[in-house]
Amino acid sequence: MNLQNMIAKRTSKAIYRDGNNVIKVFDENYSKADILNEALNLARVEETDLPIPQVVEVTKADGKWAIVTTFIEGKTITQLMKDHPERTDEYLEKFVDIQLEIHSKTVPLLNKLKDKMNRKISSTQLDATIRYELHTRLESMPKHTKLCHGDFSTGNVILHEDGSYGILDWAHATQGNASADAARTYLLFCLAEKEKLADKYLNLFCKKSDTAKQYVQKWLPIVAASQSVKDKSEEKELLMKWVNVVEYE
């Protein structure tokens, strides 16, 4: 196992390329259960025909847990939009089509999105009244079993000129309501200070999926609350704006 070629560094993990494989090495204090769950998510989503990295092994590197997967060559949609800004609308349309393809799948053994959101809301630092309102809103939402990526951003999609693609980072995959997944993607655009792209994305998603925009917006306080548990100071102001649960009543 060669850890010479680092291709990305994230909070609590480093990612290396070793030939045709990718090695994601986690910090010593990273939850073993979360690492094994990420590998299990990948293995379960592999059973669909979606183009995703394949699990090679879960192992240890320098005493740290690591997940080894196959490498998908190519540029992310984030990179493509930066290189070819004039084609942004074209890339965004493909991005939404790929998300809808994900939502067309079911993976019955994945964790349920509602259960995960309930746990996240309970562990926030929000006051009890707001937590109660969020739990109540979540329980009122229709129960679906669609495959949800959970972190679907332009940085997690590899796109090739022939239209083929690869979808990365399935650590947060669940089964649940596709509109929650769309609300999460909208929020990720906003957190990256790409509000115009966020609005364009949401309009396109709702048009292509025949979903009322207000329905996706009802999920925004819930997904914002779940994001707030990461406790990133630079995100707090924006997230608290969305957590205002009466905004879209």
Image: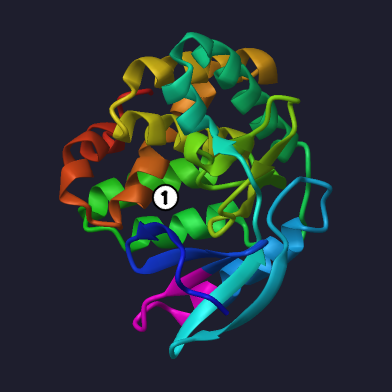
Count the numbered circles shown.
1
The reply, left or right, for residue 4 in relation to residue 166 is: left
- Between 210 and 161, the one lying in front of the other is 161
Q: How far across and how far down the image is residue 18, in percent?
A: 58, 67
Residue labelled with disc 1: 135
The question of residue 28 being in magenta is answered with yes
Q: Amino acid at mark 1?
A: His
Query: Which residue: 65% across, 22% down?
Result: 94
Query: Which residue: 77% across, 58% down?
Result: 46
Q: Is residue 227 visible?
A: yes
Q: Is residue 143 visible?
A: no
Q: How far across and how far down the image is residue 166, in percent?
A: 67, 43
Q: How far across and how far down the image is residue 40, in percent?
A: 67, 70
Relative height, residue 129 to residue 208 (above, below): below
- Between 126 and 102, the one lying in front of the other is 102
- Highlighted range, magenta: 24-35
Relative height, residue 80 to residue 66 (above, below): above
Relative height, residue 11 to residue 66 (above, below): above
The reply, left or right, for residue 171 in relation to residue 13 is: right
Of the 4 image quadrants, the one containing the N terminus is bottom right
Query: Which residue: 45% across, 22% down?
Result: 83
Q: Secondary structure at mark 1?
A: helix
Of the 4 image quadrants, the one containing the C terminus is top left
Relative height, residue 139 to residue 83 (above, below): below
Query: Residue placed farthest to the bottom in the image?
Result: 63
**Colour convention:** rainbow
The question of residue 157 being in magenta is answered with no
